[in-house]
Amino acid sequence: MTEATYKRPESLAKREFSYCPGCHHGIIHRLVAETIDELSIREKTLMVAPVGCSVFAYEFFDVDGTVAPHGRAPAVATGMKRSLPDRVVFTYQGDGDLAAIGTAEIVHAANRGEKITTIFVNNAIYGMTGGQMAPTTLLGMKTTTSPYGRKSETEGFPLHVSELLKETAGIVYLERVAVSSPQEVRKAKAAIKKAFTVQLKGLGFAMVEVLSTCPTNWGLSPVESIKWLNENMKKEYPLGVFVDKVGDLK
Amino acid sequence: MVKGNEAMAEAAVRAGCRLYFGYPITPQSEFTEYMARRMPQIEGVFLQSESEVAAVNMVYGAACTGNRVMTSTSSPGFSLMQEGVSYIAGAMLPTVFVNVVRGGPGLGDIQPAQSDYFQATKGGAHGDYHLIVLAPGSIQESVDLMEDAFRMADEYRMPVLILADGMLGQMMEPVEFPEFVKLEGINDHSAWALRGATGREANKVTSFDIDPVNLEKMNMFIQEIYKRVKAREVRYEAIGLEDAEYMLVGYGTMGRILGSVVKLARSKGIKVGLFRPITLWPFPYAELKKAAEGVKTILTVEMSMGQMVEDVRLAVEGSVPVQFYGRTGGMVPTPDEVLAELLKHV
């Protein structure tokens, strides 16, 4: 007898992703969908997609969903959650969306302890618009709007969102993870599952920052991109738990 | 005696509004404060947002669930909300806005004005869209229109704007409130609302479609709704137009002042009538043209340097001369001042 040990999660819609080869959005989508399946919350989950590469995320998850204006997903999710407090509401946002134009919305949603979950995908660049500099772009990194490399004198420094948010009192669980090895994928899954469980228990705001590659706009192969992420992004953005006020939820 | 801002807020509660998101701004802050007190009493939701940008997006999120939701603001705040208004129009979300207009442009001042007419009626944000725009001329009328505002938002799945001004927001008048609306059966949005895909396909609410063929279809669907609104919802008030040789046109607070001008002019033997549009979108073009038949001159008066007057001219299509008088920056014309202006054209 053979048994299926790996299949498409119920919460992922049966359609092709629009992501480039080697991009980590696909893995992260899968981890979120597996979490929704395992917690049996597909029928009561509302998702808010951002503007950026993951703008189609509302179509990729087989749950009720919408697309927020650029950066406003935490405010949209707030409106949903306040209207229907017994539903599960999550935002899925990139670093251009969350760390630049949407800075105010994420800080205040976190500070209010809004009972929503945010999945924050940080690839240090604007993907959808063609590889422009993001607030998270590393110093020296070349993008189409920092063609000579990002300089702190003129473009400022990489913004550390998790380090910034950990000071807000309403956030109860915050972890930065990566998905560039099987071990990291397992840790990322555990973090995402915990961030949703926090919401189910009504404990406050939870966010997981996931470091991701962008082979297309970094100008590297998928394998080189993982190497670059491991050698450069993790130095700038160290993995780890920044806030855990909830402990073991099992 | 109730202050206009508070009267409108209570009317919204009675019209079934159960969620309010807002940000303080003069001259509408009493609206926000009233909702802060009132919503907990009816197990509703009040939340003070970090900005008008956030407020309109909270409204978007709550509207996605199909529950009655609103916000109120004043001119600079409504400018900040424009992005969200466009998304709400595109995503076809039933929502109600109140703009208690103050003097502009920029920071302007906090006195009553009508200088946001273009923004309200011609599309203040990007894209092919409209709001239904209601312009009450008194506090009682603003209360009476509130139930209609929520009804239209639900029925047409579109944003409705009550365009008030600092005078309507700040003054106090006796008001009769309607009974509480019973919502059962009149705002059933279960076919499209986001409430969790229990035993059905997942619902998607969006203003987005990457394929121009589909986006055009989506936009044309909305245009069909606009046609229905134009056919059914046009409102105006006509006073003394049966034998009028001169016609005044004004809306909101200015329309009310023009009512006094009609009496003043008639006491001097001048046959003057008033046409007061109540829906600014859809604008009563045909009704105004008909009312202007046989009139020698139209004088449009606004608390702006001339915005609605463009629609008045479009309505009469050159059949009657259209004059304009306006004050700006928060100045409110008096009846005597308007009468003196009218006499120049008699």
Image: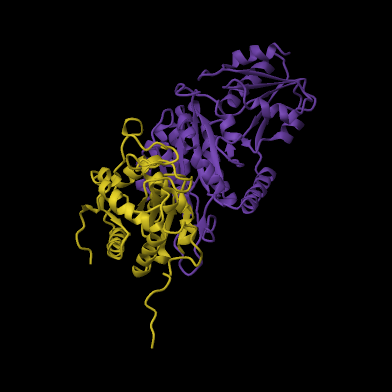
Chain colours: A yellow, B purple
Q: Is residue A147 above or below residue A89?
A: above
Q: Is residue B274 above or below residue B346?
A: below
Q: Is residue A184 visible?
A: yes
Q: Residue at x 63, y 19 (%)?
A: B261
Q: Is residue A209 visible?
A: no
Q: Between residue A33 and residue B122, name the one nearer to us.
A: A33
State which quadrant residue B256 falls in.
Answer: top right
Q: Between residue A21 and residue A68, name the one nearer to us.
A: A21
- Residue B266 spot, x, y in % from top left: 69, 18
Q: Residue at x 30, y 44 (%)?
A: A161
Instruction: Count the labels in the image.
Output: 0
- Residue B88 spot, x, y in % from top left: 52, 46
Q: Is residue B26 above or below residue A168?
A: above
- Residue A134 spot, x, y in % from top left: 39, 42
Name the side, left or right, on which B39 lies relative to B270: left
- Give the quadrant of the N terminus of chain B: top left
- Give the quadrant of the C terminus of chain B: top right
